[in-house]
Amino acid sequence: MLEKKVAVGINEETENRPALLVQKASNFDSKIHLECGNKKVNAKSIMGMMALGLCEGDIITITAEGADENEAVKELEAYLTGAK
């Protein structure tokens, strides 16, 4: 299992952000969760991602477990920090 804390660097102007994040997470076989405050959601769930309601500057923890966990965390970190 791999965990990484990141600061969200994408702003609210990205209207499709939850859907794009779910798409990116769904490309991996690993189980992936995002945690912010007291909320923890499956990164492959659109309803979960919408409920998380990430905002620029939030500190979140990306957790991945599986054969491609390193790649999954790396790609989601890049997307969430705005490095794409």
Image (spheres, helix red, strand yellow):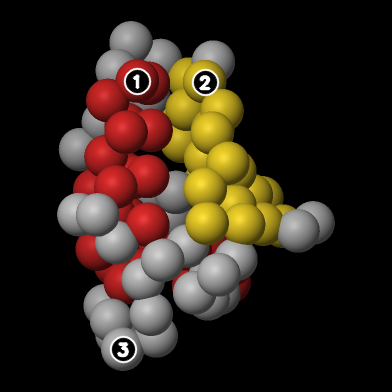
**Disc with the residue nearer the chain's start (3 vs 2):** 2
Up the image or down, 20 lies above or below 62; here it is below
Q: Evaluate if marks 3 and 2 touch, with contact meaning CB atoms under 8 Å apart.
A: no
Query: Which residue corresponds to mark 3?
Result: 13
Q: Secondary structure at mark 1?
A: helix
Query: Which residue corresponds to mark 1?
Result: 70
- For this orientation, the residue located farthest to the right is 38
- 10 Å neighbourhood of mark 2: few (<14), some, or many (≥20)? few
Q: Secondary structure at mark 3?
A: loop
Looking at the picture, which amino acid does disc 3 mark? Glu
- Please indicate, yes or no, whether residue 21 appears anywhere in the rendered image: no
Whole-percent x and y of residue 11? 38, 80
Residue drawn at point x = 29 percent, y = 47 percent: 78
**Disc with the residue nearer the chain's start (1 vs 3):** 3
Looking at the picture, which amino acid does disc 1 mark? Asn
Label 2 and label 1: CA atoms lie apart by 7 Å
Whole-percent x and y of residue 25? 31, 44
- 10 Å neighbourhood of mark 1: few (<14), some, or many (≥20)? some
Residue drawn at point x = 47 percent, y = 62 percent: 8
Looking at the picture, which amino acid does disc 2 mark? Leu
Q: Quadrant of residue 19?
A: bottom left
Residue drawn at point x = 37 percent, y = 44 percent: 77
Name the residue nearer the viewer: 82 or 73: 82
Q: Evaluate if marks 2 and 1 touch, with contact meaning CB atoms under 8 Å apart.
A: yes
Q: Secondary structure at mark 2?
A: strand
Label 1 and label 3: CA atoms lie apart by 28 Å
- For this orientation, the residue located farthest to the top is 67
Query: Residue 32 vs residue 80: left or right?
Result: right
Q: Looking at the rendering, in which quadrant would you find the C terminus?
A: bottom left
Query: Residue 43 vs residue 13: left or right?
Result: right
Query: Which residue corresponds to mark 2?
Result: 2
